[in-house]
Image (cartoon, helix red, strand yellow):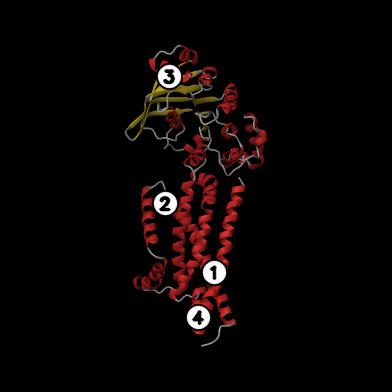
Amino acid sequence: MALVEIKNLRKTFGKLEVIKDVSLTVEQGDIVAIIGRSGSGKSTLLRCINGLEDIQGGSITVGGRDVSAKMAGLKEYRQRVGIVFQQFNLFPHMNVLKNVTLAPILTGKIKKPQARKLAEDSLTTVGLLDKIEAWPEQLSGGQQQRVAIARCLAMKPELMLFDEVTSALDPELVGEVLKVMEDMARQGMTMILVTHEMNFARNVANKVVFMHHGRIWEQGHPDQMLGDPQTPELQAFISSSRT
Amino acid sequence: MRTFGTIDLLAFATAFQYTILLVVLALIIGAPLALGFAMLRVSRFAPLRWLSAAFLQVIQGVPLLALLMFIYFALPTFLGIRLPPLLAVTAAFTLYTAVFLGEIWRGGIEAVKRTQWEAAACLGLGAWQQFRHVIAPQALKIALPASVGFLVQLIKGTSLAAIVGFIELTRAGQLSAAATLQPLLVYSIIAAIYFVVCFPLTQLSRRLEARLNGAR
């Protein structure tokens, strides 16, 4: 059975319909890249999967369970699904160690004495073990984003969502974050990411989804999608993002 | 008439203890209420927000002196019981603290970015955990200078209790001035005592703010 099953999803903000009849299947181990212009509904789709937005129609099923912002057990669900945001959202009043271990300790995933080991493991994955005692404001944007990824990893999620995680970074810092994501992909993490990084979508993802006006306009294998786009909208989008 | 002397200073010392007592009682009872009030003000349930906002308007729109007089002089005619002065003034200052400190803390809570709640929620923390571990420490830091500023207001505000005959520092000054006919001397001393207490507090607030900034 598919890990994520989205059927006929509808999402509106007041009168504005941001997601219209979207259906999407994500298998275990898939790396799905969602591309599209801003305002096409791709970030909202991701937020719906995490229960950050309530939905007006259709269904989202993750691991066989219906997901919604009002569901019972939303808290437990979120302990299994990680999300990384564009703006990192680290906790500024905690050092890196505490940022990473807060949730595993509070949710009872781990006891305090083992917390440091867990943080060390997660930070090693993102290559920031030496920053374990640092404070967020002492880190570069790329480092902060890698800590945010480590913070998610410490919860040992089954699925990770990435919401334009490199869009707020200086160009020279994008690479280090993408590399971490690539490593995670290679280790078999299921990932859904909203991204503007076409090369990443082409080289790492096994499925690309193009959203346009709140619909999935086209989806398929990256080579086919990016090499031979079928719709004029996708063709226009690809040629505009090459510049 | 008598001359100003040691006996007046002793009276000030005793009365000052009552000033401190009022402040401490108002804080001990008022601060937890303030926290609760701040939570009501940002509650997800609209009726709770409306009710607390209305209550805020009433307390904010009434001078502290009028609130004191209302509780001490007017309430007995409603309830048929006369509150002892200590109880009446404590009730007034507690209410004052709950509302004004609560408003300061609400501001602190709302100044923390919405995305901090989101980030904590997305890690699977419950609402109270989000508040306790992620929001409150940041809100406290933001609200600390204003909170200590309020404490200074509260200390000075307790002088109004003199109106209902409660003998705290200012009332003791009135009595002493009346007996010695030396208002300039007496009120200078009274003012100096308030200043000596309040001035270090504002300094402390500044230092705490600096330390919190340094800690991160």
Residue density around tag 1, few if under 14, some if 14–19, many if 20 or more, within 10 Å? some
Rendered location of residue A59, percent (x, y): 40, 28
Give the chain letter at badge 3: A
- In what element is the residue under mark 4? helix
Depth order, front residue of B129/B30: B30
Of labels 4 and 2, the one closer to you: 4
Depth order, front residue of A232/A101: A232
Disc 2 to disc 1, C-alpha distance: 33 Å
Question: Would residue A220 appear left or right of A175 to someone viewing this image?
Answer: left
Depth order, front residue of B125/B202: B202
Residue density around tag 4, few if under 14, some if 14–19, many if 20 or more, within 10 Å? some
Labels 4 and 1 in the same subunit = yes
Disc 3 to disc 2, C-alpha distance: 46 Å
Q: Which residue is mark 4?
A: B177
Amino acid carrying label 1: it is: Tyr
B68 up-or-down from B121: above or below: below
B210 up-or-down from A180: above or below: below
- In what element is the residue under mark 2? helix
**Label drawn at residue B41:** 2
Give the chain letter at badge 2: B
Most extreme residue toward the bottom is: B1
Can residue B172 be seen from the camera position used here? no
> Residue at image x 45%, y 76%?
B165
Q: Which residue is mark 3?
A: A237
**Mark nearer the N terminus (2 vs 1):** 2
Q: Quadrant of residue A214?
A: top left
Marks 4/1 in contact by CB < 8 Å: the verdict is no
Can residue A42 be seen from the camera position used here? yes
Q: Which residue is mark 1?
A: B194
Rendered location of residue B62, percent (x, y): 38, 64
Question: Would residue A136 appear left or right of A8 to someone viewing this image?
Answer: right
